[in-house]
Amino acid sequence: MKDTEQHYGGVSRFNHWIGALIVIAMLAVGLYFGGLPRGDEKSYLRSLHVSFGGLLFLFLVFRVLWRVFSKSPQPAPQAKQLQLITKVVHWILLLCVLIMAVSGPWIVWSAGYGINVFDLFTIPTPIDRMQGLHKNLEVIHEYTAQVLLYTLILHVLAVLKHQFFDKDNLLARMVKRMR
Ligand code: HEM
Ligand code: HEM
């Protein structure tokens, strides 16, 4: 289950792919409603985003902490500069996910509301309404989403380069169960 020197273990692979699905879905919905004028569609999609966010933010924080504290596999064999760029890109992605997962709930709480999860239950706000904090968190959430988007595009392009130009099947490290 745990990472070894050579391979990503089951927890890391689960975290990567379920995390990727969540991040891409949250990003797509967020970028879409972020560009809409005020109205019913925007409010509906925002409440959907917040409901999923309320359910999933602890998983996203766990996903990042697992990477920070687990013994990662050795970097894939390639030029030293590329290994360094890969490391930087992965850490930017992790930092962005952490910032998004933490700032999201606090945007809602600092507005003085609880996080309503699909009208099933509400995670109450631990603080009073703080307008200044709320505005700043909105800006942080919005700009970090942009950094996340472009870094993610770079990450996926790099994986495609490995698959189709280098033909080193890097993807297998993150897909296959190895012994
Ligand atoms: C279709 C989308 C994606 C593909 C094909 C993909 C593919 C991969 C592959 C093959 C690796 C292993 C690289 C290596 O062994 O050096 C990897 C690692 C990684 N990926 Fe992705 N990825 C995708 C989406 C994402 C997303 C959405 C995130 C987070 C925002 C992400 C974050 C990371 C991180 C942080 C690592 C380093 C290992 C880890 O922390 O789990 N990836 N990815
Ligand atoms: C990786 C996870 C997440 C991603 C990628 C993401 C992405 C986004 C994006 C792109 C926007 C639109 C920003 C704009 O242009 O205004 C947004 C807005 C928002 N997100 Fe997230 N988000 C994530 C997690 C969360 C979580 C966990 C919550 C709360 C539980 C949350 C709550 C909100 C709220 C309330 C807004 C609206 C802010 C406003 O009205 O300006 N997000 N998110």
Image: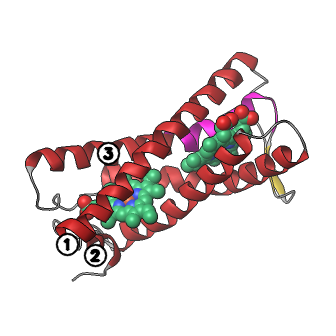
Which residue lies at the image location 9% right of the left edge and 52% below the top edge? 79
Q: Residue reaching furthest top?
A: 132
What is the distance, in whole Å, between disc 3 and disc 2 at their CAs?
19 Å
Confirm whether residue 126 shows in the render.
no
- In the depicted structure, whether residue 56 falls above or below residue 171: above
Horizontally, residue 86 falls left or right of residue 94, namely left
Residue 171: percent from the left, percent from the top? 30, 71
On the image, numbered disc 3 is attached to which residue?
Answer: 89
Label 3 neighbour load within 10 Å: few <14, some 14-19, many 20+: some
On the image, numbered disc 1 is attached to which residue?
Answer: 167
Disc 1 residue type (three-letter): Lys
Q: Quadrant of the C terminus?
A: bottom left
Disc 3 residue type (three-letter): Val
Secondary structure beneath label 1: loop
On the image, numbered disc 2 is attached to which residue?
Answer: 172
Label 1 neighbour load within 10 Å: few <14, some 14-19, many 20+: few
Secondary structure beneath label 3: helix
In front of the other: 174 or 131: 174
- Looking at the rendering, the quadrant in which ligand 2 lies is top right
Asked if residue 179 lies in the magenta stretch, the reply is no
What is the distance, in whole Å, between disc 1 and disc 2 at their CAs?
11 Å
Main SS of the magenta part reads: helix
Going from the N terminus, do you reach mark 3 or mark 2 first? 3
Magenta residues span: 99-113
